[in-house]
Image: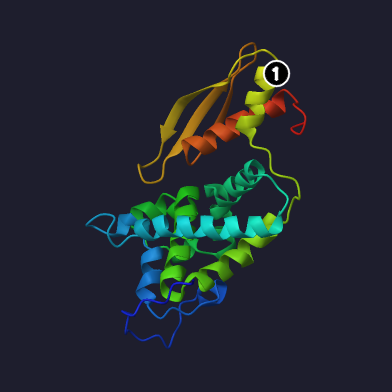
Amino acid sequence: MPRKPRNNADTSDTSSPHPLSTVLGHSFQNPSLLSEALTHMSSVPEGPHGSYERLEFLGDRVLGLVIARMLIEAFPGEREGDLAVRLNALVRAETCEAVAQEAGFGKYIAMSAGEARAGGRRHATILADVCEAVIGALYLDGGLEVAEAFIERHWRPRLQLDLRPPRDSKTVLQEWAQAGGFGLPRYSLAGRKGPDHAPTFEVEVSVEGHKPAKGLGSSKRAAEQMAAEKLLKREKVEGYE
């Protein structure tokens, strides 16, 4: 059952809706929710309270629920394992970042001048987090139906891009390495840069008898996937030629 909007709506003037209202397909009863979803912790002196972090936590769960429902309906004959691979591809940070770019969230994020000068409005991790936070804000203000409409609009085309389950690069690399008798791939953290709230990781993957490959990502998992993909492409593994 869709959750009802919160009763403690902000009573501030809503005669001028937020510029994102059209993109979101929703005019907020409680505009402070959208403001919170667009507030980076660097502009909140007392810490994460008041920034998008709590709404990001909620939005991540809402996104996962809606995408899982979409997948069950779109692929009725598919196995759980393949559905899980699809889900992971659709809810990962890279996809959320792409949606945030499409929606133009970056220019509306409140952040410190220093963070902005450092390119925070274009940082992959920040954009991905804000996207999930906005979904959380939509859910709290308008219920599941409103959040679902936004997700449908931006994720449905991605879901329909390829009728085949996406290939997880780490899984493919592991299967290829074991089939060739090279043992399991080994991943190691080669470097990390950037602030704690928006780091960039560099991971190296090595397979016995082959030159290691490195990948960058906004999370260790993303960097591992990139490193695995690079090694697969270099070795011209089927599907990565």
Q: Is residue 20 left or right of residue 114?
A: right
Local crowd at mark 1 within 10 Å, few (<14), some, or many (≥20)? few
Where is residue 36? Give x, y as percent.
Answer: 36, 66
Where is residue 179? Give x, y as percent.
Answer: 70, 18
Task: Name above or below for residue 196 compared with residue 46.
Answer: above
Q: Is residue 20 left or right of residue 51?
A: right
Where is residue 115? Give x, y as percent.
Answer: 37, 52
Q: Residue furthest left?
A: 46
Where is residue 40? Give x, y as percent.
Answer: 36, 58
Residue for point 42% across, 76% down:
4
Can residue 170 be seen from the camera position used here? yes
- Picture mark count: 1
Can residue 111 be seen from the camera position used here? no
Q: Secondary structure at mark 1?
A: helix
Residue picked out by circle 1: 179
Q: Amino acid at mark 1?
A: Ala
Corner quadrant of residue 160: bottom right
Rendered image coloring scheme: rainbow
Image quadrant holding the C terminus, namely top right
Residue for point 41% across, 70% down:
140
Q: Is residue 139 left or right of residue 69?
A: left
Q: Is residue 72 left or right of residue 241?
A: left
Residue for point 60% across, 59% down:
69
Task: Name above or below for residue 148 compared with residue 100.
Answer: below
Nearest the viewer among 77 and 100 is 77
Q: Residue furthest bottom?
A: 15
